[in-house]
Image (spheres, coloured by chain):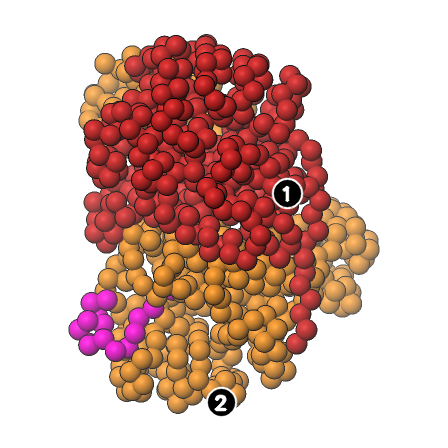
Amino acid sequence: MALTGLQIFKLLPNKNCGECDVPTCLAFAMKLAGKIAEPQACPYISDEAMEILGAAQTPPIKKIIFKNGEKEISIGAETVMFRHEKTFVNQTLIALEMTDNLSAEEFENELKRIESYKYERVGERLEPECISLKNVSDDKNNYLLKLETIQSKTEKIIILSDCNAEIIKEAMQLVDNKRLILNKVEDLSETLNIISDTQTPIVLSAKNIEELLEKVEKCEAQNFKNIILSIDFNNLNELLENNVLLRRSAIEKGFKLAGYPILTECTEEDELHSAILGICKYSSIVLLKKFSGASLFPLLTLRQNIFTDPQKPLQIDPGIYQVGEPDESSPLIVTTNFSLTYFIVSGEIENSISPAWLCIVDAEGMSVLTAWSANKFSGEIVGKAILNSGIEEKINHKKVIIPGYVAIIRGELEDKLPEWEILVGPQEAADIPKYLKEIWK
Amino acid sequence: MEFEKPLAEWKGQVQEIKLSDKVIIGGEQVFPNYSFDGKCSNKPAVAIEINDVFPENWPENLKEIWNTDTLKSPVERAKKAEKEFGADIIFFDMIGTHQDRENISANQAAENMNAILKAVDTPVIVRPDGNFEKQNKIFAKCCELAERQIIIGSAKEDNYRTITASALAGNHFIIAEAPIDVNIQKQLNILITQMNFPLERIIMDPMTGGLGYGFEYTYSVMERIRLQTFMDDPFMIPPMVCCVGQETWKIKEIKIEDEKYGSKPERGINWETTTAIGLILSGANIVVVRHPESVIKIKNFIDSIYQKSDCLQQGI
């Protein structure tokens, strides 16, 4: 359970030495409570305090780390029920199922199709990061051959599904353990023996929470840490109930047996629905049986939205953006790099059917008025951004439209850009189409 | 093993509103659909958006499914939305009243509205467009001349008086719209009720950010609003409506030509469906969409998630 700043303060030496780079112990305690400092930073902290703080700092849901090429990907480590309370930490992984009964050629083509599914969006690459290989053929050599293909042609995390202990044993020789998850193992106790040293993450599945917790208890007794939970469901209401109750038990009640990431096997008939529910309501992995390009795209975007840190709004990279297909006589509009501002402004320019150049200024992700009052959207800064953007080579005029709310920076901007004409645009983005129609002919 | 369900104890309840004999929204005492925590009452309703003018900005595949001739007639659209596409509610978005568009007059707008009210049996949400002066004229006319009870929108923090007075006089429902902001929403609800307008006739529009375009702000604001409801804040009880279609069918992602991401129509439907379901999960009582396939998919979701509960089906 999380401690408050004052509870933590009582555990500290109260020397106010400042060696932790915070002037007082109270201020340090507040930082610890906000999880923006580590207890190790205090040179005089007692072992007892360290232990209490260590336990308090361990997230109520177990974190499991995977290797995805050069990067690490984690699941779990969640601390809240609602994203606005802090943030949802590790985004739901999206897994696509492949079966081993395809011919070598079909298999490679399908793999290629999955591997090529990527989309770049606000500086992030959206893609499914896991492949689940389901053992249908029941032919060890064939299964391992297909596994080898995935392992060599992609960097994705691999879920071994429906395998017996013998296959698992050999698969673990083939693939880096940091890339593996075991799902639906045929013989649990035998498999546990094989993975006792490697601690390969394993999915425990059950028909209901009670049965699941019994399995978790057994695994914990054998010292297994990397557990993933999965419960069958007949309808979405059951999925919702199980996910919410497990998350609540772990986070609000500190119930350790429930404190593991959840894998949701989406049902084929309402795959999109169960995946949406899983992403919004606490699944750490959603497993899709059918690869539909048209479903995956909104799901990846939903996931990006839900797992955005509400305290650090998405920022757009500063620079020049094209809205429509602008040419050298198209208008130049300037605004801040707050994602919402960008989306609304670019959306309205699109609505105007008049293509334009959009200059995005680095205002630390603030909206126009907030940025201006924090001095991040001054004439000086906007002028510099325009001069450094290289836009002068793309347009044959020297006119720039600034947001109506910051008409006040016009003079300063004129000083910075003496050869330019500064036009004051509308205050609200919704009025941009009309403005462009009237002013820009 | 024994497992003690950690149940939440909430106090407040969303206002239940009877929009027609068949359509009742709100009434829930828990998040949707946390039937294990408590009472859910009524399923969310799916509304379909129609306009008073031809929607030239819609993508071709959306126009095709509606049929171009149908789209030219608001009345035909309303009938199709109700009878063929299964709308629980018609959302009549009068974009043609904007002074920079067709500039349809207030009298004409009221006439158009009455034609819709006559053509369908569903509840109808009516929303004019234009500057405040123009909108206010239409609020007054529509509320005065409506041949049955309507839901009129939108009251905003800086323009709520005329609409509130008109809806009060005509005994209509009102939509209170705040810019993705919990505090402004509450303030607006209070301002409207201070004019003696009953809270029981307000529906909140928290404003919808499209998926990938600010969706997460709306999602969290709605969750925060509902947390306040269930912590018994008397001013935060109205049901919520989300206009999903308008924020979906204009975005770049559904216009990309690339088979890898599926066909454009299917991608658009899934985008609209995903957005609507996400917002239902954060508390929407009405979602407004454009594509008939989305209506089916969203209703399937609602049926599955509201399976284990005592709540009522819309339209029965």
x and y, in percent, of residue A366 in the image: 49, 32
Magenta span of residues: A95-110
For chain B, what colour was chosen? Answer: red
Q: Identity of the amino acid at label 1?
A: Leu
Mark 1 and mark 2 residues within 8 Å of each other at the beta carbon: no
In the image, residue A231 sits, relative to residue A283, either above or below, namely below
Q: From where the camera sits, is residue A172 visible?
A: yes
Would residue A342 appear left or right of B64 to someone viewing this image?
right
Residue pointed to by mark 1: B227
Q: Which mark is residue A190?
A: 2
In the image, residue A301 sits, relative to residue B232, either above or below, namely below
For chain A, what colour was chosen? Answer: orange
Q: Is residue A99 magenta?
A: yes
Q: Which mark is residue B19?
A: none
x and y, in percent, of residue A327 in the image: 19, 26
Which residue shows up at 69% across the image and 66% down it? B4
